[in-house]
Image (cartoon, rainbow, N blue to C red):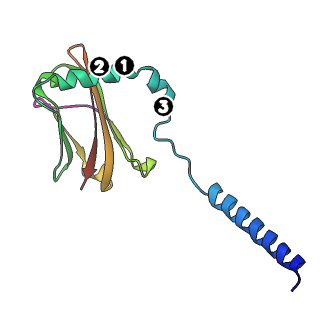
Amino acid sequence: MSWGYKILIVYIVFIAMILGMVYVASKQTNEMQDENYYAKELVYQSVIDGKNNLNALSEKLSISNTAEGVTIKLPAAAAANITEGSVYFLRPSDEKSDVRTKLIVDANGIQTIPAAKFKKGLYTVQISWKSNGKIYYNEQKYTVD
């Protein structure tokens, strides 16, 4: 085999590899972790204030797995007179598995989200609410069993 054919084979293999990479790249999903990233960045000071308000309390927010689902318990001082609130379970590996719900706690400051809404695995939990004119915010990693 002459050197001309060897060069031709190298070119063909190179072109096949490039086309293969283009095909694989076109099949990848480009999910963003948050669609409103830039808008949220502009109001990030309220998140900082919410974290500081929550850290100033002696009692801490807790999240736990129960037979009914995932239970969130707010500190008693921050659970009274909630005017608005939201809970967002963000699953980094699958956007379709994210869980969003309003924060609606009982008299003890507890909310249980049914287990049927979750897949087992790692979530980033973002909880924000307004109580007695103060903003509260918590973000943490949590594993649903």
Q: Secondary structure at mark 1?
A: helix
Q: Earlier in the sequence, mark 2 or mark 3?
A: 3
Q: Secondary structure at mark 3?
A: helix
Answer few, some or many: residues within 10 Å of disc 2's Cα (few below 14, many 20 plus, some between 14 and 19): some
- In this view, the residue in front, 19 or 108, is 19
Answer few, some or many: residues within 10 Å of disc 1's Cα (few below 14, many 20 plus, some between 14 and 19): few
Mark 2 and mark 1 residues within 8 Å of each other at the beta carbon: yes
- Where residue 137 appears, x then y in whole percent? 28, 27
Left or right of 34? Residue 28 is right
**Above or below: residue 106 compared with residue 70:** above
Left or right of 94? Residue 5 is right
Residue indicated by mark 2: 49
Residue indicated by mark 1: 45
Quarter of the image that includes the C terminus = bottom left
- Where residue 11 appears, x then y in whole percent? 81, 69
Give the CA distance from mark 2 to mark 3: 19 Å
Q: Earlier in the sequence, mark 3 or mark 1?
A: 3
User: Which segment is the magenta one?
Assistant: 102-109
Residue indicated by mark 3: 37
Quarter of image, res 133 = top left
